[in-house]
Image: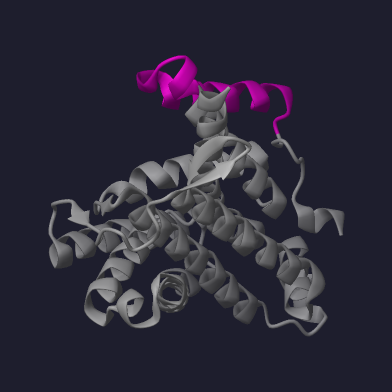
Amino acid sequence: MEQFFQQLTNGLAVGGIYALIALGYTMVYGVLKLINFAHSDLFTLGAYLGLTLLSSLLLTDRLGPFWGTILLAAMVMGLIALVGALLDRVAYRPLRESPRLSAVVSALGASIFLQNTIMLIYGARFQVYPQNILPATALNLFGIQVPVIRLLVLLASLALMTVLYLFIQKTRIGTAIRAAAIDQGAARLMGIDVNRVILLVFMIGPALGGAAGLMVGLYYGQINFTMGWVYGLKAFTAAILGGIGNIPGAMVGGLLLGIIEALGATYLSVAWKDAIAFLVLILILIVRPTGLLGERVAEKV
């Protein structure tokens, strides 16, 4: 039972990271019907910027582990949001009226450019995060010792997802995003600046991905310039699992995928954990092709 609970919490923490990345994919797809292949590289860039800021500004030494990490996360999210806005302005907006294939090729080109830029700047070797940034102690939950950093990653992921959901559902800007996802032409007739909405989506999604990259660095202690490929594929799978274009679906899909991986690796085989996750995805899509939560949230409003 203790092993099950340990793997459950580990799966939830990793699933929270998947969910944050998946939200970037699903938000862009919801508005543009486009898969932003460069999103996973923005996640990687967030991890590397987090390491750079952590090493150069010494925020955790000056402000303490808690406030230093929060300020670090805010800075990383802000910087990656700006990169996401620049990516939209350079790689996507000029092709808004072009055939869809042109935007897909541009997204792939942006992904290759970002990945190689990270490699040229930081090198091809693994980079190691400073140790003991967050507490290495464990918390006793119902008689089971759970690492504090695992709980912090999970709680931070859930907090960011909750804020995003409330922002989309309860604010005027969120309403504009949902309107643009339903029908861009009608949204323009209602006075909504669709280009500004798309720009905002390209800032929010990468910001969450950047936060996920920072979490990976703090949680695992090392990062690599190619890690966006693996995490991006898992996050894209999570988005499809929950229902592509559906924000709660991306959250549920990410958490579920993390749990499936963790339990599959423990009780079956570590070597088969990816195969198990994709097998579950295939089975769910056979039964429910639109994903667990069905159609896009915007279409239900």
Q: Residue at x 56, y 76 (%)?
A: 199
Give the magenta-colored segment's residue range: 264-289
67 or 266, nearer to the observer: 67
Residue 186 picture location, percent across and down: 80, 72
Looking at the image, residue 106 sits to the left or right of residue 239; the answer is left
The correct choice, above or below, for 296 with respect to 267 in the image is below
Q: Quadrant of residue 108?
A: bottom left
Residue 121 picture location, percent across and down: 16, 67
Give the position of the C terminus as an image quadrant.
bottom right
Looking at the image, residue 88 sits to the left or right of residue 194; the answer is left
Residue 122 picture location, percent across and down: 16, 64
Residue 225 picture location, percent across and down: 24, 54
Q: Quadrant of residue 180?
A: bottom right
Q: Kindly report the secondary structure that dominates the magenta region of the rendered protein.
A: helix
48 or 140, nearer to the observer: 140
Give the position of the N terminus as an image quadrant.
top right
Q: How many marks?
A: 0
Residue 33, can we see it? no
The correct choice, above or below, for 169 with respect to 173 in the image is above
Asked whether 273 falls inside the magenta stretch, the response is yes
Q: How is the image coloured?
A: one colour
Q: Residue at x 64, y 76 (%)?
A: 197
Task: Return the residue found at the far top.
Answer: 268
Asked whether 296 falls inside the magenta stretch, the response is no
Looking at the image, residue 296 sits to the left or right of residue 104; the answer is right
Q: Residue at x 45, y 58 (%)?
A: 212
Looking at the image, residue 270 sits to the left or right of residue 283; the answer is left
Residue 192, can we see it? yes
40 or 14, nearer to the observer: 14
